[in-house]
Amino acid sequence: MQAMNGLPKDSMGGPDPPTSASGEHGWVKRRTLTVRPAAPGYGRALENGLYAIRQLNGVSGAEMVSKSSMSITYDLRGTNFEQINEALACAGIALENSLHSRLCYSMIRYMESIQRENAATQSGWSSYVRDIYVSRFQARRHGARDDRPQQWRKYMQPPTAGRQRPSPDVHQ
């Protein structure tokens, strides 16, 4: 598969862009993570890392795609990327540390935190709009008010009930 810059996808280094598998409101995430190979015995560390990830609540699948990348499918309501990263670190597995990878992983953390935060609010955007209108209503003056300057009020007074206006046909 060719990437946008013409290089094969695997030679770009770094993770695939964040993708979502089918799920309720995008809760199920499928991530392909690139790991850094380490010292001898790294194969055992990868097995331990995959086992640790599979034990997390919400992870439905974790497998090695190649020697340096793994595919993980998880439900965001049960776990998040940060917990998966911590489980990998405890198993002795480090994610790729290139600038591109770090930016992608930071974006994943940010998007997941925003999605979880938005899900925590029950009413969402409509409550914010309602709060804005309520606060504006409470800040306004209520009751009878005349916003005209004081000097204009004596010239532009409406006729009172006790005083009659002269009829337009009478001129003296």
Image (cartoon, rainbow, N blue to C red):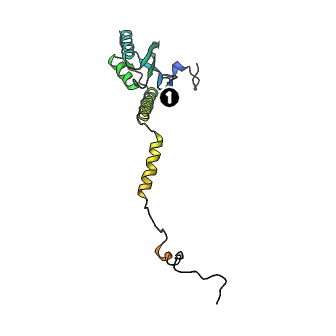
Secondary structure under tag 1 reads helix
Q: Quadrant of the C terminus?
A: bottom right
Seen in the picture, residue 8 relative to 151 is either above or below; the reply is: above
**171 vs 1, nearest the viewer:** 171
**136 vs 63, nearest the viewer:** 136
| Total residue callouts | 1
Q: Residue 49: where, in percent of width, then height?
A: 37, 15
- Is residue 94 something that shows in the picture? yes
Q: Crowding near pointer 1: few (<14 within 10 Å), some, many (20+)?
A: few
Q: Amino acid at mark 1?
A: His
Farthest residue to the front: give it: 162
Q: Would you identify the image quadrant in which residue 127 lies?
A: top left
Q: Residue 146: where, in percent of width, then height?
A: 48, 69
- Is residue 18 something that shows in the picture? no
Q: Residue 52: where, in percent of width, then height?
A: 36, 15
The reply, left or right, for residue 62 in relation to residue 168 is: left
**9 vs 53, nearest the viewer:** 53
Farthest residue to the left: give it: 90
The reply, left or right, for residue 48 in relation to residue 129 is: left
Seen in the picture, residue 85 relative to 41 is either above or below; the reply is: below
The reply, left or right, for residue 76 in relation to residue 169 is: left
Farthest residue to the bottom: give it: 172
- For label 1, the residue is 25
Q: Residue 61: where, in percent of width, then height?
A: 45, 15
**170 vs 154, nearest the viewer:** 170
Q: Quadrant of the N terminus?
A: top right
